[in-house]
Image (cartoon, rainbow, N blue to C red):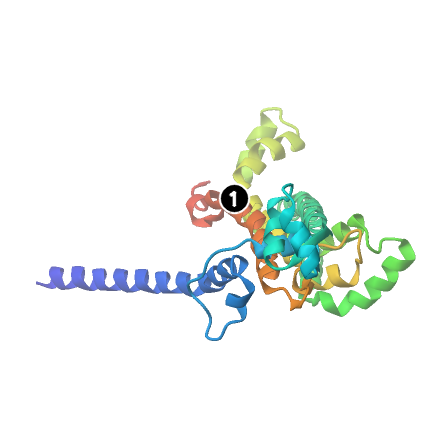
Amino acid sequence: MAKVTNETQTRVVTAGRALLAVSLCVLYLIPVVWMFSTAFKPRKAIISVPPQIFFTPTLEGFVGLFYKRSTLTPAQMEQYRQRTDLTWAEKVALEQGLAITRQSDYVGQLRNSLIIAGGSTVLAVVMGVLSAYAFSRFRIKGQADLEFFILSTRMLPPVVVTIPIFLMYRKLGLYDTHFGLIILYTVFNLSLSVWLLKGFIDEIPKEYEEAALIDGYSRLQAFWKIVLPQAITGIAATTVFCLIFAWNEYAFALMLTSNRARTAPPSIPSVIGTSGVDWAAIAAGSLLFLIPVAIVVFAMRRYLLRGITFGAIRQ
């Protein structure tokens, strides 16, 4: 009887945890689902009160995101309707009484985000794994103080130093450059990278490297062939965290860029249509901005489950 009661309690607890997990997932996904639906809603459905759940999907938001448009007069609309060489984007714009004038800057801004976030993430992870290996394997004078100093740089809110960095970047010619933002994001991500990776490398037994050194490996060969493969889980997790910070960063991208190196985050909220804020275009831009990070996280999902590999190494 007691065994049956314990099994029932276990099932109830398991079901309760599963229900809680599903509820949290649904709660977290509501904004994403709402953003997805808004990206395909016509303008009338977006501003309607109460909100429309069911609607006819349209690509108005994506046309507003990728193209600049102007209002057509009735005579111009009649001329456009008689044309047979209209692209799909021009046809969608024509349904709103608009004409496409030129491409927007969104594609270039998304490319800037890829370059800056990708470059800073690679630099932060590479330098972080080398620094973490040095802190983990060698005795360094004042190591505790150095580690605390590195961590303390993460405690400072980035917006506090925006004005000094802005003035410095104007003097050095780094304002509105890819290189300037890559350096800045690398510096702010490096502390997180060092501390995360040091914890992973600390759990790799030193005896593996010592055995490799006895077999004739150099220190660099032992690091490359022994430590890195064992630390791949930590490297993947650190890469994701650094990429998310650099990808979503707003304050520096807004203050330290204007046109050439402007990234997507400060540009998406400022999308203006012919009659005010174009919410469909903003939702479409946010949706496309979400996809690259989602792909990276999905590709590294098997490395992000820290518990799968941690504890597998035994001295």
Please name the amino acid that badge 1 sits on. Thr
**How many marks do you count on the picture?**
1
What residue does disc 1 label?
Answer: 233
As rendered, which of 101 and 105 lies closer to the eye? 101
Outermost residue toward the bottom in this view: 49
Of helix, strand and loop, which one carries label 1?
Answer: helix
Along the horizontal axis of the image, is 210 left or right of 149? Answer: left
Q: Position of residue 178 (x, y in %)?
A: 78, 49
Quarter holding the N terminus is: bottom left
Q: Position of residue 196 (x, y in %)?
A: 59, 52
Q: Position of residue 66 (x, y in %)?
A: 66, 51
Q: Is residue 51 above or below residue 188?
A: below
Q: Is residue 141 visible?
A: no
Along the horizontal axis of the image, is 138 left or right of 29? Answer: right
Count neighbours of disc 1 (C-alpha within 10 A) and say few if under 14, some if 14 to 19, many if 20 or more. many
Q: Is residue 162 above or below residue 286?
A: below
Outermost residue toward the left in this view: 1
Q: Is residue 158 visible?
A: yes
As rendered, which of 265 and 166 lies closer to the eye? 265
Which residue: 78% across, 66% down? 162
Q: Position of residue 285 (x, y in %)?
A: 61, 56
Outermost residue toward the right in this view: 171
As rendered, which of 113 and 51 lies closer to the eye? 51
Which residue: 64% across, 44% down? 86
As rendered, which of 29 and 103 lies closer to the eye? 103
Which residue: 84% across, 56% down? 175
